[in-house]
Amino acid sequence: MGTFDYINMRTNGYDFHVRLMAGKESWDSPQVKSVFNHWRELLALYEPGFLGRTWQEGGDSLATRKRACTCSGSFVAIQFTDPAAAKDLTFFAFPPDQPKWGHDSVEAPIDGFLLSKKPKNEAGAEGAAHLPRQRGRENTWLGVDPSNIGTNKGASKAKYTPLQKQSAALIASSKHNLAVHGRDTRPDFASTVMIPALQQFLNKPNDVNGLVKSIEKQKKAIFSS
């Protein structure tokens, strides 16, 4: 999903992407077709059997230098347990297809801690959830997890790894910050329509017209309900 999002934002801009996620643009439009056509050109660079691999397997291939690049969230950094490999890890923003948009948009989901409605130890669970909010606790967390950066303006960057500094700089320089496809649109549309549709595309990338027509038909049914 993230690959589609970035190509779409670079090709058609932030506003079009947001409207598309909200069901206000047509999935069988020329703009969306151009996204899939661009993406199809990239598939020649993918490793064999990529659709059957988990993100953990892809991250392991990257960490062991069997593969040079992956499209993933920064959480892939947790798999780089070898200090030498971790030092070699970096990322780049997708090149812009249209100079008009450049790199003005980035997906930067904000994650947090969730509680069960009825935990066995409610007081303990609430205490654990509040710990990261206490002064200094966020800094402790960031010091041991190089895949995250702090959302609190008061969070210290003193122990940031080069990867964390690079992430913070990209987000700070971006005009628009989004979550990710599955959070920026209706969950029922993302899970029941887009996941199967993208898998279909990756299996048979030559029928873009049929693909987007099917997505648009299902979108109308879901968003009108």
Image (tube, grey):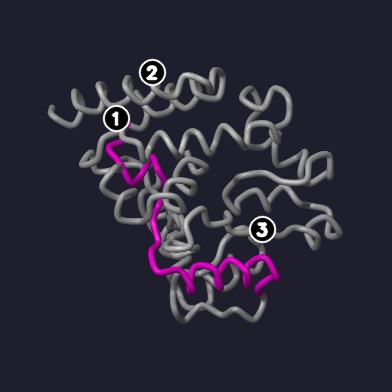
> Which residue is tagged 2?
210
Q: Residue at x 66, y 27 (%)?
A: 50
Q: CA distance from mark 3 to mark 1?
A: 31 Å
Circles 2 and 1: CB distance less than 8 Å? no
Residue in view at x 53 percent, y 23 percent: 205
- Taking the magenta stretch, the answer to whether it contains residue 164 is yes
Q: Which residue is mark 1?
A: 188
Left/right placement of residue 75 relative to residue 14 reads right
Amino acid beneath label 3: Phe
The image quadrant that residue 143 belongs to is bottom right
- Element type where label 1 sits in the image: helix
Q: Which quarter shows the C terminus?
A: top left
Q: CA distance from mark 3 to mark 2?
A: 34 Å
User: Which element type, helix, strand or loop, lies under badge 3?
Assistant: loop
Callout 2 amino acid:
Gly
Span colored in magenta? 160-189
